[in-house]
Image (cartoon, rainbow, N blue to C red):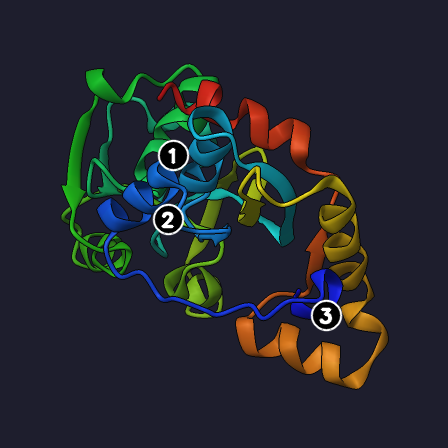
Amino acid sequence: MGRAIKAKVSVVFVREFKQLEEGMQSGRFDFVMARPSDYPARGMRDYGYSYIASTKPDGQCLIIVPKGSELKSIQEVKGKRIALPEQIAYMSRFCVAALRDQGIQVGQENVQFVREQAAVGFYLDNRFADVGGVASYSGIAKKWEKDGNRILYKSVAQPYFPLVAHKRIKPDQLRAIQAELLALPDSEAGKDVLKRIGIEQFDTSSEPRMRELLKWLNI
């Protein structure tokens, strides 16, 4: 990115989402990249930030069931005990929207919100819940089927780990950054960068979905 805009880019790790939002609101951050995609989406909607890219693969809500579950389809989730991440978490809102699209209103179901996604697996393993919702990019999702369990349903894909830029970043600079990001898989050094941040490649075509994301989440 620094090479693309011919300027030094300093990385700041923000541990609190409140600080991230305040940084976008005040314009403190020239660039913002966050795994909960609703924050960069809010940067675009509320604070004038411009889309640059998201990453591949996209994110999905996976509706999972433990080994031995008799559930065969997403419609059978109605009336069952559902475990989701804590209510304010992005992935919880993501799964609520995904279930809503399938005619399941979470507010009318028996739902247990747990602090971490790993706890969803604990609830299922110990029969405290019948079905759970987790992120496709979570640690539990990556090993769920390997451990003999099942994924009952995969939601629509949404942009993952988006990168946005403050309005002070000029259009030609945005295009230059996009070109650099798209070229990363073409070199060994670029592949190493992608591997270190845990993604396959960047995607510069997801702006329309980013602009619709908050509407879909109903936030």
User: Considering the image in quadrants, where does the N terminus appear?
Assistant: bottom right
| 13 or 196: nearer the viewer | 13
Residue under numbered circle 1: 95
User: Badge 2 is on which residue?
Assistant: 134
Does residue 63 sit above or below 5 in this rendering?
above
Mark 2, other Cα within 10 Å: few <14 / some 14–19 / many ≥20? many
Where in the figure is residue 124, as x and y percent of width and height?
24, 52
Residue at the (63%, 54%) spot, across then down? 55
Which amino acid type is shown beneath numbered disc 3? Arg
- Eyeballing the image, is 166 above or below 201? above
Residue nearer the viewer, 153 or 86: 86
Dot 2 falls on a residue whose secondary structure is: strand
- Residue 110 % position (x, y): 16, 27
Q: Residue at x 64, y 77 (%)?
A: 193
Q: The C terminus is located in which quarter?
A: top left
Q: Look at 66% across and 33% down and name the residue there.
A: 207
- Residue 186 in view, yes or no: yes
How far across and how far down the image is residue 47, in percent?
44, 30
Percent x, y for residue 147?
A: 41, 69
Please tell me which of labels 2 and 3 falls first in the chain: 3
The residue positioned 79% from the left and 71% from the top of the image is: 185
Residue type at mark 1 is Cys
Contact between marks 1 and 2 (CB within 8 A): the answer is: yes
Instruction: Write down the quadrant of residue 149 in the picture.
Output: bottom left
Q: CA distance from mark 1 to mark 2?
A: 8 Å
Instruction: Name the residue furthest right.
Output: 186
What number is the disc on residue 3?
3
Q: Residues within 10 Å of mark 3 (few under 14, many from 20)?
A: few
